[in-house]
Amino acid sequence: MGKARGNESIKFLVSIAVCQLAGFIGSRFTTPAIPTWYATLEKPLFTPPSWVFAPVWITLFLLMGVSLFFVWREGVQSRQAKTALILFAVQWVLNVLWSFLFFGLKSPVAGFLEIGFLWIAILLTILAFYRISRIAGFLLVPYMVWVGFAFVLNAFFMILNR
């Protein structure tokens, strides 16, 4: 019993760390661009202040980590679980890639094209996670909503800064 709890604790911590790692990697592209390139962009009226993004993303990555844990602890032997985890990995990579494209390459157009794929990957991940653990699926809904908002915001950045 103690060993099972120990394994679950490790899975939980690894799940959280993996998701927070996406934020850390993305911030390597984002942070230097905020006071320079991003500050010069024309922004829509509904753009949140820059300080809002860090706590929102930290929270979303925490929810993603808990969601990942709920699926991982069910096991990875089934085809359904493997598919769900592959979808999760795809959306994780797409999440980091958006930061690179938008902030690193300073390309609202590339960011806009990519974030649509990210939103679809999140939706597919939610559906796959939900089949394994309803709570895991629900925990990703705020992430999908935020990325949907980011999609609209990105579209406005693209239009306003041609």
Image (spheres, rainbow, N blue to C red):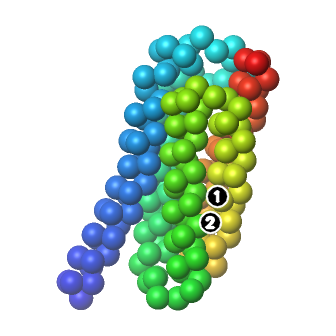
Which residue corresponds to the image point at 43% horizontal and 54% vertical from the top-left? Answer: 19
Seen in the picture, residue 73 relative to 27 is either above or below; the reply is below
| Quadrant containing the N terminus in the rendered view | bottom left
Q: Quadrant of residue 146?
A: top right
Seen in the picture, residue 6 relative to 96 is either above or below; the reply is below
In three-dimensional space, the C-alpha distance between marks 2 and 1, rounded to whole angstroms, equals 5 Å
Most extreme residue toward the top, as rendered?
40
Which residue corresponds to the image point at 76% horizontal and 31% vertical from the top-left? Answer: 155
Q: Which residue is mark 1?
A: 122
| Quadrant containing the C terminus in the rendered view | top right
Residue 21 location in percent, x, y?
38, 49
SS of the residue at dot 2? helix
Q: Quadrant of residue 141?
A: bottom right
Residue 157 location in percent, x, y?
71, 24
Q: How many marks?
A: 2
Left or right for 30, reference 10: right
Q: Amino acid at mark 1?
A: Ile
Near mark 1 (Cα within 10 A), the count class, few <14, some 14-19 or many ≥20, is: many
Residue 66 location in percent, x, y?
45, 62
Which residue corresponds to the image point at 64% horizontal and 79% vertical from the top-left? Answer: 131
- Residues tagged 2 and 1 counted as in contact (Cβ below 8 A): yes
Left or right for 151, reference 3: right
Left or right for 11, reference 27: left
Res 140 seen here: yes
Res 154 seen here: no
Residue 81 location in percent, x, y?
54, 80
Q: 66 or 156, which is in the foreground?
A: 156
SS of the residue at dot 1? helix
Q: Which residue is mark 2?
A: 125
Most extreme residue toward the left, as rendered?
2
Near mark 2 (Cα within 10 A), the count class, few <14, some 14-19 or many ≥20, is: many
Q: Amino acid at mark 2?
A: Thr
